[in-house]
Image (cartoon, rainbow, N blue to C red):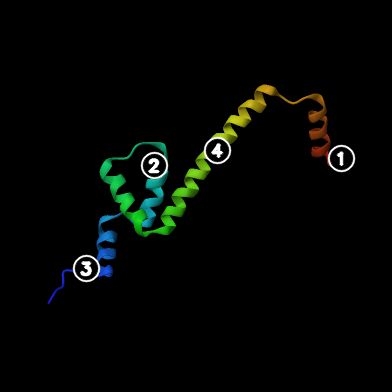
């Protein structure tokens, strides 16, 4: 006698069959940041994110790394264009020699 309700364990098993593994998700998350993935893949990833807090965290970390590296890239270019003044260069020389 079925009441029509689906057991939560059954839903989890279906999710795991249909969605990528956590190992696959790591590569897919990285790829997702570089290019647009096919719709089917994106849907499978969304399904995985629904039940996997660890992969959601990995995605957040990848996005943070991407934003941070973009900011660092911009500041590095700006610093290179501005250059160091003589006092800063001397300070670096002393620091590299171990002098105060």
Q: Which comes sooner in the sequence, label 2 or label 3? A: 3
Numbered tag placed on residue 74 in the rendering: none
Q: Quadrant of the C terminus?
A: top right
Inter-mark Cα distance, 2 to 1: 46 Å
Q: Which residue is mark 3?
A: 6
Left or right: residue 77 versus residue 12 is right
Left-right relation of 18 to 34: left
Residue closer to the observer: 100 or 1: 1
Give SS at disc 4.
Answer: helix
Mark nearest the camera among 4 and 3 is 3
Which of pointers 4 and 1 lies earlier in the amino acid sequence? 4
- Label 4 and label 2: CA atoms lie apart by 16 Å
Residue 74 location (% of width, % of height): 58, 30
Q: Residue furthest bottom?
A: 1
- At 44% from the left and 58% from the top, the residue drawn is 54
Inter-mark Cα distance, 4 to 3: 45 Å
Above or below for 91 versus 47? above
Q: Say which residue label 1 marks.
A: 99
Crowd around label 3: few <14 · some 14–19 · many ≥20 (10 Å): few
Disc ID at residue 69: 4
Marks 2 and 3, Cα distance to the nearest angstrom?
34 Å
Residue drawn 44% across the image and 49% down it: 59
């Amino acid at each position: 006698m079925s009441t029509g309700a689906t057991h939560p364990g059954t839903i989890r098993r279906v999710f795991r069959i249909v969605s990528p593994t956590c190992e696959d998700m790591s590569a897919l998350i990285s790829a997702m940041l570089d290019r647009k993935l096919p719709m089917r893949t994106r849907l499978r990833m969304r399904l995985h994110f629904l039940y996997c807090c660890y992969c959601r965290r990995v995605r957040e970390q990848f996005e943070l790394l991407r934003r941070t590296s973009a900011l660092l890239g911009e500041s590095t270019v700006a610093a290179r264009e501005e250059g160091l003044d003589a006092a800063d260069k001397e300070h670096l020389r002393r620091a590299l020699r171990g002098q105060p």
